[in-house]
Image (spheres, helix red, strand yellow):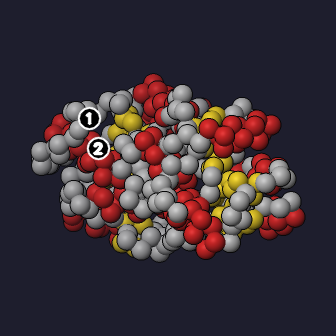
Amino acid sequence: MVGCDSGLVPHPDQGEQVFTQELVKQLARLAPVVAYSSSSSFPSLRLVDPHPLISPGLARRLWEARPWAVGYISHLTPASLVRMRALKAAARGAPVVVMPLVSPSLDGARGLLTRLLRPDLVLSSATGTRSRLRELGCPTADLPPAVDLDRFHPPDPGEKARLRAKWSLPAKDQVVLHVGHLVPARNLGALARLAGRPGTTAVLLASHVRVAGSEDLKQELLARGVLVLEGYRPDVAELYRAVDCYVFPCRPGGGIDLPASVLEALASDLPVVTLPFGALPERFPNAAGIRFVKDDGEIGSAVSEMLLRRPGTRALAEAFSWEALARRIVNHLYALAAAGRTKPAPAPLSHTEGEIRVADG
């Protein structure tokens, strides 16, 4: 496993890092895994020197290890496609499975390069991305969401009141929450409008990620009544259990295709109001506990509707454990090995959803 290559400095509360670390942890329970990163922010991954193409140290380790497959968590960019080929060569031709967590643009020169350097398999959450990749000759399969169902769970009886006191939240207000980066693409002005409603408290738990204008955005939110909490909180699961509704107002570019925070909210049994972001509409079509809105103007009424109905959402997340995702990925890797593209691998793991094939779905 090699991850992740996003161009951002990873943080413990960044979706790509959560995905990478959780997946590596689960894969290691199912198969022999060695994971590498050029960032020291991934404590569970072995550190290799940064390099524009591939670290000589990593290339040497791959050559000596002779892996039967390589997983590469990366955006699908021209640079990552070339790097993917370098990884494959260093691994003596072992198949490479690329997992882009954000839907790429595949037009023009990028599409041509994808066709020329196509990976052995691309796992993507978005149907449109998989369709376009197949047009370019790339085998694809679905990359389902995953969430820690033990850590994120509904509140126990009486727990919400206790947690509100701990997090200094008003006991009687309706509390809406967003967890994410303090950046313009998150469209956080929607929280400010919710904060102006009587009896409503809007809370933002802002990650470490900062860009130009982040501090100005924070001051604007504070001035308009949003409660802004900052920094990585290992006890964030408590915050989900303390609030009433989760809001995800982000526009394209504001997160990965299946945002971790939305899955965490669902696992915590919170109703969700969201713009039709990424792969969320196709993953949860017609779900009673998720209200998709067309624009910012509908967010307020949708939140009111959800707070009135209080639909449960835990069942929407229960199929998406990290173990289930890891088993699916391992079986894809085994299928590639069994197809003769690398040295023989063990028999596939049992899988409740039937045989895993190197094809869509």
Q: Position of residue 275 (x, y in %)?
A: 67, 38
Q: From where the camera sits, is residue 58 visible?
A: yes
Residue that numbered label 2 is attached to: 328
At numbered mark 1, what does the secondary structure look like: helix, strand or loop? loop
Sequence-earlier tag: 1 or 2: 2
- Residue count near mark 2 (Cα–Cα under 10 Å), binned few <14, some 14–19, many ≥20: many
Q: At 83% from the left edge and 61% from the top edge, which residue is drawn?
A: 225
Quadrant (top left, top right, bottom left, bottom right) of the C terminus: top left
Q: Which amino acid lies under the numbered mark 1 shown in the image of this protein? A: Glu
Residue located at (75% from left, 65% from top): 227
Q: Position of residue 309 (x, y in %)?
A: 62, 38
Is residue 145 visible in the rendered structure shown here? no
- Vertical arrangement, residue 117 with respect to residue 11, above or below: above
Q: Give the amino acid type for the residue marked by disc 2 in the picture.
A: Arg
Q: Which mark is residue 353?
A: 1
| Badge nearest the viewer, 1 or 2 | 1
Front-lying residue, 39 or 88: 39
Q: In which quadrant will I find the N terminus?
A: bottom left
Coordinates of residue 53 in the picture (x, y in percent): 46, 59
Is residue 240 rendered to the left or right of residue 184? left
The residue closer to the viewer here, 298 or 21, is 298
Q: Are marks 1 and 2 in contact (CB under 8 Å)?
A: yes
Left or right of residue 196: residue 308: left
**SS under mark 2:** helix
- 288 above or below 254? above
The residue positioned 26% from the left and 62% from the top of the image is 28
